[in-house]
Image (spheres, rainbow, N blue to C red):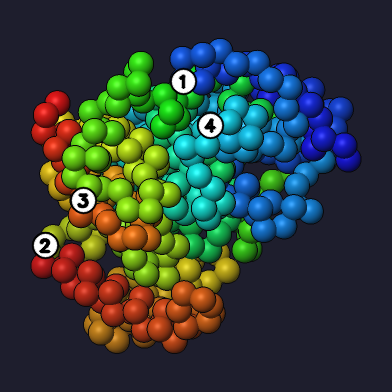
Amino acid sequence: MANSTHTIKVNVNGQTVSADISSELRLLDFLRYELDLTGAKEVCGEGECGACTVVLDGITVNSCLILAVEVDGAEITTIEGLSKNGTLNKMQKAFIDHHSVQCGYCIPGMVLSGEQIIKDHEQPPRDTIKEDLSGNICRCTGYQKIVDAIETVANQS
Amino acid sequence: MKYFAPKSLEELKDLFLSNHDLNILAGGTDVLPRWQDNPSLKPNVLVDIKKIPELIGIKDSETDIKIGALTTVQDLKKSELMKLKFSSIHEAACQFAGVQIRHRATIAGNICNASPAGDLLPGLYVHHAVIEIYGPKGERRVPIHHFITDVGQIALEKDEIVTAVILPKSTESSLFYKLGLRQSMAISVVNFAIACEQESMGTFKTLTIAAGSVAPTVVYLKSFTDAIFNGINADDAIQLVDDEISPIDDIRATASYRSKVIKNVLMHIIKEIYVR
């Protein structure tokens, strides 16, 4: 059966976007190939690794597990939406200060999960940070420095 | 693939009347990976039920609580009521996948997926969950152990959907145990839930155990609990667990490992409850 086409209107990183899309297009592909927002990555493609993490209506989700047509009317923040006027936000700066980035593939997801952690917990213990980061996998195994960065921001706020 | 997102049960009913092969989408966390592996599984007509308000929210009443089909695993984790009254289900929610999946995965999705390893299921079984179903012919209710019939199989007609899960309130306390290959993002090798009420130390007034990943569906370990009630020593009774389970070898563990580990852990926990 032919794919049906739908018009969706979403707010991505503060800007309203309208697009005609196929019902089968995943949110991840919509962001990467239609909007050229390539921060969210495809790695496992089945919700195991968190590299495709974006913020949908205020909560982190795996964009590889969502159809673009499902998010009509929603607000989406990707890693590209965190900096303001070319200035990185606290979490992004902390990742740089703690040398948390190696190959970088998992980092957009890690940063957004870090933002979710400081939103969900006031001064979270290290174990809570690790637990809430468990949906994001880093294969350079640089977790120590990633957790350090999030912990620093959590203790500032 | 045609896509519809009805805004009420009434609109959904109209869709059921005009289409005969609808596929329901809730959180999508199990559905989309399946398409990734095998694109031919994409349905002709997909119905996204997330915009139906009747399916949202947890309602508390004197005798039971009613959990809307779209309640996410994260909602269950955050619920004080679940933590207080249905701790096995709450514990399962806390150990479920990772944050991003918990934000999307729904209670009805976990049930309708009917995986033998579904983490919410043992807790729902020991708390005698009843599935509320809606279709053009009206509403009906089915106990969860009759609703899930086999691996991936449920007693739902093509023109019906699950609207809620009803949990009768009781004075029992419950716990959940999960063995995975790692702590997070792990499909259970074995999982189980225990609900019980003790008369005095060492005497059970009620005892219900349900285990997952050891049979095509979650199973009640009734031979074992009956033996306990009949005064049989727990060390002997535990062997009866093998009567109820039919584990298989798969990529996560062997059948014999599953049989051994469930008996060992169960024994350990039952003895702990005895002296609590």
Tag 1 and tag 4, C-beta contact below 8 Å:
yes
Tag 3 and tag 1, C-beta contact below 8 Å:
no
Q: Which mark is residue A130?
A: none
Which element carries disc 2, helix, strand or loop?
loop
Residue named by callout 2: B276
Residue named by callout 3: A145
Position of A77 relative to B262 (above/below): above
The image quadrant of residue B241 is bottom left
User: Which of the two marks, 1 or 4, is nearer to us in this view?
Assistant: 4
Q: Give the distance between the C-alpha atoms of the residues marked 3 and 2, in whole angstroms.
A: 41 Å
Q: Give the distance between the C-alpha atoms of the residues marked 1 and 4, in whole angstroms.
A: 10 Å
Which element carries disc 1, helix, strand or loop?
loop
Q: Chain of mark 1?
A: A
Q: Give the distance between the C-alpha atoms of the residues marked 2 and 1, in whole angstroms.
A: 53 Å
Q: Which mark is residue A13?
A: 1
**Amino acid residing under circle 3:** Lys
